Structures are given as structure tokens and as C-alpha cells.
């Protein structure tokens, strides 16, 4: 009798909605190829009927959601917010604003909350955005940078050079998108200011290169040449055309592009390795962002963290984003860059650029200049 009564008090009745936590878990569990779709569809349907007190839990659920689940959560949030706003012209504004300001929360969820807040109270932009110049969300940073950039342009147009320079500099300190960086750097230089783009983006510009090794018929991609076993900067190896050794190279390109084709011959059907170090005073999670039109592999402290066997599909800034972990002290970074044997003019590029940054794209600079040892075991 008591068991039955207890169940009646705690268990959903037939046709009764499941608790919101169960609905959120069902959505978070959705996967590819129809996995969990039936349960997720039912959960979204129930969740979309919720009241305003379900909005924050939905946003929190973004934390453990895959991209597909995120889309479904967004749909449920929009449905609840739209209905509540249409019926009462109210949303839990203070709770939503607190969520937006919490940089530990999921960036997509924060942005969704912000977009709805603006509908309720347009003045929220003036309260929130100015403080987001170094936010963990790229979208919020962009908004904050643009506000400063607009003010800088007006100051420059009004012949207020010191004010314009100060505003441009402040905007640049938070800028992570290349188009905004260029829009800031151009007028700064016109005003006589110098800007170090290599440092701003966090490009690694000093490398030891060794090669070429053989990549005839693209066979070298899967061959573990000696640098993959151990880094010995004093060693010499048999390469594609004879003996090869490590040579130190630095790039002066503002965007950190290291042009291997100009430094290594022959530059067709070949493999070159690039090695550098990065010093940090504490363990930290980073993103390594790189661009190259060539096939490549990347190791951090001897661990293969990513690889791409693809040639001449174009290249751009931050083309690839690779998460990695650095240890305290000196960290070894090794790139393997492969060139095929295509003869078309557009297939002659053999180059790469690589930078270290946080998840938003802001540069992480080394704690000190790395002292490269002659031999580092991997």
C-alpha cells in the first residue's frame, strides 16, 4: 500500500510530462543515424510547452550537448520564449542577464539568451557589451570591438588623433577576427603607429626545418622519418636527394607564413618537418590554429594531435583548429608538411602558418623565449 502511494506521489502518471531533467537528458542523448531521435522528439515537444522557469535549465543543458542536440535545445528555448513574450511581454530578464554575463557558460547558450534579452530590453546592449572586450565568446568580443572601432573612426574624422589612437589600440586588444584587425591596423598605421601582427595573433615564427624526404606518389605521408622518432637538431639523415640536416628559419611574414618551397629543393613529391618550442609557466589547454594547402601532421610533446592527408584545397587563417594541452616548461611542437607532384600553377604552394591561442582565438604568448636544446627525446 505504502509502495503504491509513494509511486503515485513521485512517478509521472500516464500522459503526464516527464520532469524537465529527464527531457533535457533525452535531448542531450540524441545522436547520428537516428540514435535517440524518438525520445528526443517527444522531449522537445514537452519541453516546448514549458513556462519561463524552464528557460535557464534549457540554456544550462547546452554544456553537455552535441551540435545536433544543441539545435533541438535552441528550438525548444525559442518556442518557450516566443510564447511567454507574446502572452505576457515578460521574460526572466535578470536571470537571463546573469547567465549572459557568466563567461563559464556555453557561448552559444549565452548568445541565445542575449538575443532574446535585446528583444525585451534593447538597453541591455549598452550595459553588457562594453565589458566583453576580452570575453570567452568570439561573438561578444566582436560586438565590443566594433563599438570601440566605431568610436575611433568618429574621433579620427574629427581630427582627434590621440583619442582615435587610444580607441583603436583598445579595440585591437580584444580583436580576434581578421577583418576587424585589418580595419583597426590600417588607420593606426596611417596615424603613424606600429603594430606587430605576428605577436597580436600569436604566430610561431622561428622554426628548425629539415628535408626534403621522399613523398613520391604521396607515399611519404605514412612513412615515419627520423624526426618522428626523436628530435636531434645536431643529427643528419638521408633525404630524398642526399644528406639533410636541420636548418633554422624565421619568417618575417606578418601572418607567420613559412614558405617551404622557397627554402627547400626539390619542392615536389617531398616532405619537410618543422620543429619549434613553446614555453609556458603552467600547464594549460590551448588551441593550435594553422593554415596550409598541403597534407600535414602535428605533434605536441611527442603526441600526434591531428593530421590531414589532403592537398591544394586552398588555405586561410585558422583553417584548422586543434585542441592540445601544454605542460609547464618547454613544449615541443613538430609539423610534418607534405607536397605532392601536381604541376598546375596553383598547386605549387608548400607552406604553413601556425599560432597558439585560447578557445576564443586570442593569442597565448610564450612565457619566455624558448631555449632549444640540441637533443630532445620524443
Image (cartoon, rainbow, N blue to C red):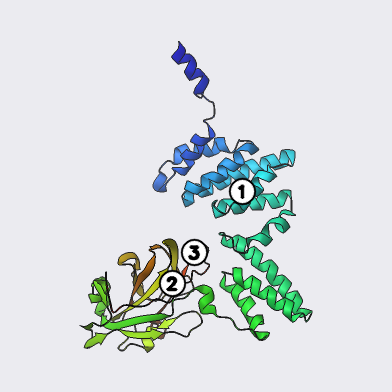
Left or right: where 78 falls relative to 9:
right
Q: Who comes first in sequence, dot 2 or dot 3?
A: 2
Q: CA distance from mark 2 to mark 3?
A: 13 Å
Q: Position of residue 145 (x, y in %)?
A: 65, 67
| Residue located 68% across and 84% down the image | 191
The label on residue 297 is none
Q: Position of residue 356 (x, y in %)?
A: 45, 70
| Residue located 52% across and 44% down the image | 61
Left or right: where 264 falls relative to 365:
left
Viewer-side residue, 32 vs 334: 334
Q: Who comes first in sequence, dot 2 or dot 1?
A: 1
Q: Position of residue 141 (x, y in %)?
A: 61, 63
State the residue position of label 2: 290
Q: Quadrant of residue 59?
A: top right
Viewer-side residue, 128 vs 338: 128
Residue 59 appears in view:
yes
Viewer-side residue, 173 vs 368: 368
Q: CA distance from mark 2 to mark 1?
A: 32 Å
User: Is label 1 in a helix, a strand or a loop?
Assistant: helix
Viewer-side residue, 302 vs 13: 302
State the residue position of label 3: 358
| Residue located 52% across and 73% down the image | 201
User: Is label 3 in a helix, a strand or a loop?
Assistant: loop
Amino acid at each position: 500500500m505504502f509502495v503504491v502511494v509513494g509511486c503515485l506521489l513521485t512517478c509521472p502518471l500516464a500522459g503526464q510530462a516527464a520532469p524537465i531533467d529527464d527531457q533535457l537528458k533525452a535531448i542531450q542523448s540524441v545522436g547520428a543515424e537516428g540514435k535517440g531521435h524518438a525520445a528526443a522528439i517527444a522531449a522537445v515537444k514537452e519541453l516546448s510547452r514549458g513556462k519561463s522557469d524552464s528557460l535557464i535549465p534549457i540554456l544550462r543543458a547546452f554544456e553537455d550537448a552535441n551540435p545536433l542536440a544543441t539545435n533541438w535545445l535552441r528550438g525548444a528555448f525559442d518556442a518557450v520564449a516566443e510564447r511567454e513574450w507574446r502572452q505576457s511581454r515578460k521574460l526572466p530578464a535578470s536571470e537571463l542577464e546573469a547567465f549572459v554575463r557568466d563567461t563559464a557558460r556555453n557561448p552559444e547558450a549565452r548568445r541565445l539568451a542575449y538575443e532574446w534579452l535585446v528583444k525585451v530590453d534593447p538597453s541591455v546592449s549598452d550595459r553588457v557589451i562594453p565589458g566583453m572586450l576580452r570575453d570567452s565568446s568570439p561573438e561578444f568580443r566582436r560586438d565590443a570591438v566594433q563599438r570601440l572601432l566605431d568610436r575611433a573612426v568618429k574621433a579620427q574624422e574629427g581630427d582627434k588623433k590621440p583619442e582615435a589612437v587610444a580607441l583603436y589600440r583598445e579595440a585591437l586588444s580584444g580583436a580576434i577576427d581578421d577583418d576587424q584587425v585589418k580595419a583597426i591596423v590600417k588607420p593606426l598605421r596611417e596615424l603613424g603607429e606600429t603594430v606587430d601582427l605576428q605577436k597580436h595573433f600569436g604566430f610561431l615564427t622561428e622554426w628548425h626545418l629539415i628535408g626534403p624526404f621522399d613523398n613520391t606518389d604521396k607515399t611519404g605521408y605514412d612513412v615515419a622519418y627520423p624526426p618522428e622518432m626523436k628530435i636531434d637538431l645536431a643529427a643528419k639523415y638521408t633525404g630524398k636527394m642526399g644528406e639533410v640536416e636541420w636548418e633554422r628559419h624565421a619568417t618575417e611574414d606578418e601572418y607567420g607564413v613559412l614558405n617551404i618551397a622557397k627554402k627547400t629543393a626539390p619542392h615536389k613529391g617531398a616532405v619537410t618537418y618543422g620543429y619549434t618550442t613553446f614555453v609556458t609557466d603552467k600547464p594549460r589547454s590551448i588551441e593550435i590554429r594553422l593554415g596550409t594547402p598541403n597534407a600535414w601532421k602535428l605533434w605536441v610533446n611527442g603526441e600526434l594531435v591531428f593530421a590531414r592527408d589532403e592537398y591544394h584545397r586552398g588555405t586561410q587563417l585558422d583553417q584548422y583548429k586543434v585542441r592540445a594541452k601544454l605542460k609547464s616548461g618547454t613544449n615541443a611542437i613538430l609539423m610534418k608538411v607534405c607536397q605532392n607532384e601536381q604541376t598546375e600553377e596553383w598547386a605549387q604552394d608548400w607552406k604553413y602558418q601556425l599560432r597558439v591561442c585560447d578557445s576564443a582565438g586570442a593569442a597565448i604568448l610564450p612565457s619566455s623565449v624558448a631555449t632549444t636544446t640540441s637533443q630532445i627525446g620524443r
